[in-house]
Structure formats: structure tokens, C-alpha cells
Amino acid sequence: VRRSTEEARVALLRAAFARDDPRVRLGIGDDAAVLEPSPEALVWTVDAAVAGVHFRTDFLSRSELGYRATMTAASDVAAMGGDPIAVLSSLVLPADFDDAELSELAAGQRDAADELGAVVVGGNLARGSELSVTTTLVGRASRPLRRDGARPGDEIHVAGELGMAAAGLSALLRGVRPPELAEALRAWRRPRARVAEGIAASGVATAAIDASDGLACDIGHVAEASGARAVLDESALIEGPLQDAARALGLDPLELALYGGEDYALLVALPPGKSVAGFRPIGAFVPGDGVWLRRIDGRVTPIEARGFDHFAPTP
Amino acid sequence: VRRSTEEARVALLRAAFARDDPRVRLGIGDDAAVLEPSPEALVWTVDAAVAGVHFRTDFLSRSELGYRATMTAASDVAAMGGDPIAVLSSLVLPADFDDAELSELAAGQRDAADELGAVVVGGNLARGSELSVTTTLVGRASRPLRRDGARPGDEIHVAGELGMAAAGLSALLRGVRPPELAEALRAWRRPRARVAEGIAASGVATAAIDASDGLACDIGHVAEASGARAVLDESALIEGPLQDAARALGLDPLELALYGGEDYALLVALPPGKSVAGFRPIGAFVPGDGVWLRRIDGRVTPIEARGFDHFAPTP
């Protein structure tokens, strides 16, 4: 087991992340990274993955952790219709975290960055008692998508799965791994930022958000910011794989789809009659406020727009 | 004691950080911040302040922590000759961290951002066992300063104090606060990123770095990247306030100046005969490698370029 000095670890990361990109002038090795001037607006986000809070270390390999932390941060850039350029990674590593683990973590980050078409250009290394990966991403966006532009009449479309990640996490928490949950486990462990879909939607969609806290909560943010009511169609929310995963776990698929969270699916509001490749309709905005559900039997009723709250009082 | 939900805390921060800036299109409240297109190169950095590692919670008020975390991150932008535009703040807060503490922390961040001419445009909130503040900053730089351009014959100049922050930290660690250490305490608690000096030096300096790990270590990075030897003048390193602080602590002022760290002074290499307002000469680059010291008695000898290593084996 090898645990190198900080300088040697920076060299390890520099080698792992070396990439040429015309949008990046200077990567790892100076006081700061240098990006070329940008003719387009820049979208910029930061996201933290803290052990014991956002993940359990026995639920993810180091490589999966690196991949997942990068993709979940990138999902915010995708939700703005942005094209990721560059990544900074700030790591807090426990004293016993060794070089092999660091290499594995970096490999996962690099795989995600490669898929995103982005370059890891720097970061920070610190010792700490709690493993954490804080990822900050910059992307370019010619027409950034916001939360507050949805209008009554717009349709709600989604790219990506709903409820599957929560089913996967539920399986991990129970310690069960039946074969019919393989896809759900993959959904939680290897989420995919919907970058191409976000870029395709920008210029068409009137609003967008990524479903990280759960569909009901996140579409509720759009409804509130836009001053409209979101009405979701139950019949459109539950697809075959979610049915199967929910059955294997004895869980309600509707509950998973609405409140599961961590899907990193992309939700957009589209003007009536518009569609974008990769998206499917799941509801519409109408005058009013809040989040409502059109049930299979035709009734339309309000639902709670709750999501995960880091600072909620313990029940 | 009030501990609000995540949403209420985001609203608190949104109010604390509200600022208009023509370079910022969209701040807190969406999936990501939006910055206007940049005609200049962008310099971009991230820095973490972890309780128990970078600071002790009894050494800094919450406001000082927010100010310090922002300034130490900005120091990297200053060292590239960058003009800070915007800040993202990722906070990990223990369960008992209350709203008053969060407001105080944010006030310190806002004060620092105001001094830097930057806007806090977003961030992330998470629960965790270990308080940490991870700050990422973007600045614009027409002529970014790098570490690798110093040439033999260039002079080494510094803006800011050397050794004073280490004296202040030493006083805190010993629990002593004689009046003659007030300035040293301030140097550790309220470091200042040398933004104006960095901008003034860009286009003149051949290399730059901020003295965060200690003068000897940091000038050693420039020497190594540039392929030259740094020779520091002992007589130029020790100023009156450092003499006084070192005497009050019974410490060697030279040791503090060379190895103290956390000064966030700005070190630049200037072509022979050049000077920049706010900087004073402390040495020169010559052919060779490593870091050497010209002692008061005229001897010139190599010195160790060691600095703080997060992952050094425990002695």
C-alpha cells in the first residue's frame, strides 16, 4: 500500500487528467487553470458528494464514486442547456486513503469527463476525516435554460429514467441484489448527465431543471419559479423497468417515480405541440400553482412537492 | 437557536449575496449560475477550508472563516493576474450549525467578495460531520501569469507580509495574545488576496505564485517550473513587525519568513530593472536550480524548499 506525498499525488492526477482541448489554455500545475475567452455565456456549478451523507463507501467503488460525483455535477450544467468545458475536483481524503484508491477515483472522474467532452483542469487536495468529492464545472451555453419560463399550456417532457436510481439505492440499503435490479443499481451508481438533450432543448424549451431531489420536488421548483401549476400524468410516469424493479422490492412504483430522487433525468417545459428528440411527455403546466397528479382513473389531485432536505428536523 | 430547512437557508444566502454586476447574468436560485461571455481568458480555482485541518473552529469566528476561505481562494486568482468575477461556495455543515452561524459565515464571505469586486453567484449546501467551506472562483485575465516563465537575471519581488500569519497561528496554538501580536493574529485571520498587485504585475512579471505553503516552498515551485535557481536575500525578508512578533514568541523570524506559510503574499519574477507598485525586492533568479539564501554575512547557501504536505508521513 502506497500513500504518496501531496506533490506526488498531484503528479498522479496531472497524468491521469492530461487532455488537449482548444477551449483550455492551462490545466493542472499552476495556481489556477486558464480557460480561453468564451464567445458564449458560461454556466457554472458546484456539487459535493460527502461520505455518509450522499453515499456510503461500501455502495460505490472508488471509480464509481469519481464517475458519479462528476456526472451529478454535470447534470446541473445540462439542465441549463450547457456544453461542459472543464472540471475542477476538490478532494478531502482520510489519512488511510492510498494511491491505488486515488488512481481509481481519478479514473472514474476522467471517464465521466471524457463522456462529457470536458477536461479536468485542476482542483485541490486536503486531508480530512470524512471522504468527500466536490466537483465544480464550467460549460458554455448560447441560450441558457432557466427554471422560471414555463407558461400554462406548455407540456412537461423528460429525458431519462424516473424512480430507477431510488430503487437501486433501496436495494443497496437492504443488501439485496436480485438480477431484476441490475438496471436500477446501474441507474444509481452510474447516472448520466443529459448534456446532448439539454443542448437540443435550449432554444425550444421555456424552462428546465434536472430531477435530482425527486420529480415532484423538482417540477415544483419550476412551477413556483414560473407561476404555474404542474400536472403530471401517472400513466406516463411508470415504465416497464420501474414496474419490475418496484415489484422486486415490494415498493410502490409511483412513489419511486415521484419522490425517489437522484435520477438526474432532465425535465423541460415545451410550448404546445413542440417536441425534442430524446424527451417524452409526462404532463403539462396549467394556470394555478403547486404540483398535481392526473391519476389513472382520471381524477386530478394535488400532491406533496417534498424532496430530500439536508437540514430537515429529524422525525 | 434556529435551524432552518435547506430551502430557507438557500433563501437566507440568496438575500445575503444579492448584487448586480454586468458580468453576471444569473446568480443563486437556478441549477447553475450564468456568467456573461468573456472577451478575456478566464482563470479558475478551487480551495477547501476543512475544520481540524486548515483551521480550528475556536481560532476563527464564523465571519472570519467566511472571509478567510474566500480570500485564500482568491489569492490563486490574484497569482494569475486575474480580476475576480464570481464565487461559488460549497458548505458542509454539522447538524448543530444554526442559522445565526450561517448568516455570520455568509457575511464574512460577502465582505471578502465585496473587497474583491466579485459576486457570490451560487454554491451547494450539505450536511456532514466536519465543517468545511470549499470556495471556487472565476476571474478574467488579459495576460495570465504563470509559474514557468522566470529567467536567470529576473528579480524576485513580493507584495504583502512574510511570516506574520505563521506568527499569528503560533500565538493561537499557544493560547497567548500579547498586544504586540495583534498584527500577526490579523495576518492569519484576515489574509488579503493581492488582486490589484497581480493585475499591475501582469504584462510585466515573467512568473508569479502566491506564498501559501511558505516562501521557500512556493518560490521553489517557480524555480523548478522555470528551470532557474531562486536566491533569496535574508536581509530583505525580515521586517520590523515580524522581528517584534518573533521576539514576543521566542521564534526565529527567518524561519517564520521562509517556512511559515499562509501569508498569501504575491511573489513575482520581474525582468532586471523593472518594478511594480506595491512590490519590494527580496532576491533574484540565477542559473542553476533549487532555492538558496544570501545570508547577512554574505554567504550563499542552499536551503530546503519544504512546505506543508497534507499527506506527509507522520514523523
Image (cartoon, coloured by chain):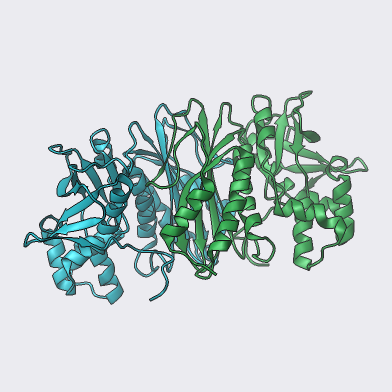
Chain colours: A cyan, B green
Q: How many marks?
A: 0
Classify A14 as above or below B95. above
Query: What's the residue at 21%, 47% (across, down)?
Result: A287
Q: Position of residue A242 (x, y in %)?
A: 16, 62
In the rendered image, residue A229, in percent from the top left (x then y), is placed at 23, 51
Does residue A98 appear left or right of residue B291 in this picture? left
Q: Quadrant of residue A6?
A: bottom right
Q: Which of B230 and B60 lies nearest the eye of the viewer? A: B60
Which residue corresponds to the image point at 20% horizontal and 47% vertical from the top-left? Answer: A285
Closest to the observer, A48 or B149: A48
Q: Is residue B89 above or below residue B138?
A: below
For the point 20% across and 43% down, the residue is: A152
Left or right of A235: which side holds B166?
right
Is residue B260 visible in this depiction of the protein?
A: no
Extreme-right residue of the structure: B297
**Is residue B302 in view from this perspective?**
yes
In this view, B169 is above or below A156: below
Q: Nearer the viewer, residue B192 or B285?
A: B192
**Residue A295 placement (x, y as % from top left):** 11, 61
Q: Quadrant of residue B118?
A: top right
Location of the C terminus of chain A by quadrant is bottom left
In percent of width and height, residue A258 lies at: 22, 61
Name the residue at 62% across, 64% down. Answer: B313
